[in-house]
Amino acid sequence: MKLVVQAVEVDSVALEQVACLVQAGGIVQITPHAFRLVDAQPRPELAARCIELGLDCSWVCGERRLADFGLFVTDMDSTLINIECIDEIADMQGLKTEVAAITEAAMQGEIDFRESLTRRVALLAGLPEAALGEVYDQRLQLNPGAEALMRGLKRAGLRTMLVSGGFTFFTDRLKARLGFDHAYANELEVADGRLTGRVHGEIVDGAAKAAHLVRVRDHLGLAPEQTIAAGDGANDIPMLRAAGFGVAYHAKPVLREAADASLSHSGLDGILNLFA
């Protein structure tokens, strides 16, 4: 196993402290913001110390390279992008606080995702469809490193999939913008130019996310260990468990516990560094 230490900014003194803690035989620079500690030894206090120092520390099989994988799957809201789209749509109705509270409970795993989505979407009834465009144009931003991550994945030959408990209005646009091979999400029902407060078709929940991963993986003829999945909330647990390697990105504690690696101080391109 190799230990990768990274962050948006890595303090050299903090890096040396971690290297000393794990009795590393050396420090190899991967990028200006990521380092591999040679011959590092596991220490029970490592995780807590890295949190104190503002560093991401991830143990990865030393033999694994990005090109060994064939499929990358990511969540959208608060993973690929900086917002929860439904919360921002609700803000157009003056209901952001109420909807955001339900969103947070679902992401923490405190309430069922299907129930939470049904309740939140119902509150959007009557909102003009044009409000979706306003959210995309005015509020949605890619999380740091998203474009670099996609470039790196494509160079390594991986297929990419965006799968979300959010909405097709946003996933379709992000698929075209970033070049995802596949995208799946919930479709908001619209009548006479306004949201009805209902979802059209089957709800994409945690189980559906995992099912999409497995279906595309099998279609590509890949083994389970040839997939990477990234997410931030409880709804992503089944997807990460179905993947060969799961990444919790700026995630809730419940997902960090289920992930193979957690990135809380790095951009999305930090995923590339894990397999450099």
Image (cartoon, helix red, strand yellow):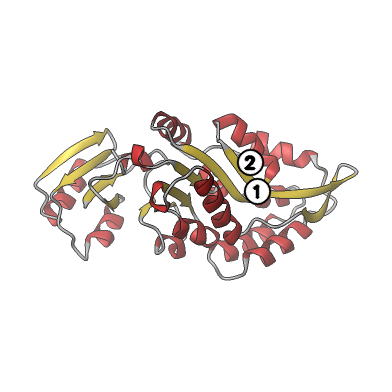
| Quadrant occupied by the C terminus | top left
Q: Residue furthest right?
A: 192
SS for callout 1: strand
In this rendering, is residue 167 above or below 95? above
Foreground residue among 164 and 56: 164
Residue 163 visible: yes
Residue 140 versus residue 41 in the image, above or below: above
Q: Amino acid at mark 2?
A: Thr
Q: Which residue is mark 2?
A: 171
Q: Is residue 8 visible?
A: no
Give the Cα separation between the discs numbered 2 and 1: 7 Å
* Residue at 34% from the left image edge and 41% from the top image edge: 68
Number of the label disc, if any, that sits on residue 167: none
Question: Residue 73's spot in the image, x, y percent?
Answer: 50, 46
Structural crowding at the residue carrying mark 2, measured as other residues with C-alpha within 10 Å and reported as few (<14), some (14–19) or many (≥20):
many
> Residue at the spot x=54%, y=56% of the render?
210
User: In x, y percent, where is residue 162?
Assistant: 56, 43
Task: For mark 2, give the secondary structure.
Answer: helix
Classify residue 156 by image quadrant. top left
**Residue 203 lies in what quarter of the image?**
bottom right
**Residues tagged 2 and 1 counted as in contact (Cβ below 8 A):** yes
Q: Is residue 77 above or below residue 178?
A: below
Q: How many marks?
A: 2
Residue 46 at what x, y percent from top left?
Answer: 23, 60
Q: 93 left or right of 149?
A: right
Say which residue appears at 79% left-offset and 56% top-offset: 198
Q: Which residue is painted at 52% across and 57% down in the image?
A: 236
* Residue type beneath disc 1: Ala
Residue carrying label 1 = 185
